[in-house]
Amino acid sequence: MDLPAYPPRVGYLPRGFRTLQDLDKLREMEMFRENGRDGVWTVMANVMDPESLHRAFNGCVGVFHTSSLVDPGGISGYTKHMASLETKAAERVVEACVRTESVRKCVFTSSLLACVWRQSYPQHRRFPTTVDENCWSDETFCRDNKLWFALGKTMAEKAAWRAARGRDLKLVTICPALVTGPGFRRRNSTPSIAYLKGAHAMVAEGLLATTDVEQVAEAHVRVYEAMNGTAGGRYICYDHIVRRAEEFVELELQLGLQARAPPPHDEQAATAIATPSFELCNRKLTRLVSSRRRCTHDAYLSVSYD
């Protein structure tokens, strides 16, 4: 995932990391002397090469791993093979963080899809089942239903946690919903399309949510800053839940996708949408972001000028 350049905080010297797929873009930046102009320096590395990652991370205190594999031709989409590659890449990145002496913290971008796909519960439950940071998608269910993007995110996040377990590295994972925002789909079309596989079922279960790219960027920064204190574990990030078929069609159009017709209307489906089986919960992240905003606000208010 390509997050926008978030305003660098005082005392930070951001270093952007790009893979060999982005070599032409980096050469263009060097040609026009854009590298470092906005305070962010870009380096190249091979995400599958531990030595290359170690050199890229050396001197950094924290690492944000936000990458997502892209299908440049837009032909194959996100495949089972990509899920396997993303898992290996996640493991390599965390291992490189552990190996690099300067790195103390890693913020790993996963996906809400790593939390939501499980075997269906019996209908007519009195209360919806809460889906929060404690929930994991069922890998067998994802394989059986060819939900490769969800499988890749689930496997990659679990691999990251395994690689960090018992090591001198503080790891936090953020699980954003479908990321939206001006220009985001153009730069990240493969994950946007892959995320929506099984979307009608997600809408019916109350599990299809979106989040603006700027909010995702802020969540990464807020969590990173809070890792010096009590922040830890997983955080679900979303700001809107798609509850109606009309909203879903509008979402597809916003993403530049061909809108698909909603499934045929029937009373049972309408009732399911009105009373979804699941309820998303991002309370953990909301509390953290709110407290960090209050701290920042109080800090500004405490400054006096002569």
Image: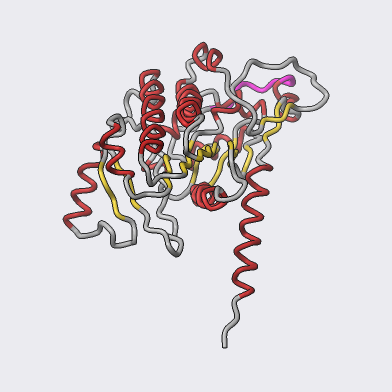
Evaluate whether residue 195 shows in this view.
no
Residue 64: % across, % down: 43, 44
Tell me if residue 295 can be seen. Answer: yes
For residue 245, side relative to residue 13 (left or right): right
**Residue 83 point in image, percent of width and height:** 41, 22
Q: In this view, does 183 lie above or below 257?
A: below
User: Which is nearer the eye, 178 or 14?
Assistant: 14
- Please give left or right for residue 191 compared with residue 289 in the image: left
Q: Is the magenta stretch mostly helix, strand or loop?
A: loop
Query: Which quadrant of the rendered structure holds the N terminus?
Result: top left
Foreground residue, 287 or 146?
Answer: 287
In the image, is residue 300 above or below residue 167? below
The reply, left or right, for residue 222 in relation to residue 79 is right
Residue at horizontal 59%, vertical 71%?
300
Residue at image position (50%, 52%) is 221
Magenta segment, which residues? 261-268
Residue 116, located in which quarter of the rendered image? top right
Residue at (54% x, 36% y) in the render? 175
Q: Position of residue 183 (x, y in %)?
A: 41, 48
Question: Percent from the top left, x then y, of residue 119?
Answer: 64, 15
Observer-nearest of 199 and 47: 47
**Count of labels shown?**
0
Residue occupying the point 32% across, 30% down: 71
Quadrant for the C terminus in the image: bottom right
125 inside magenta stretch:
no
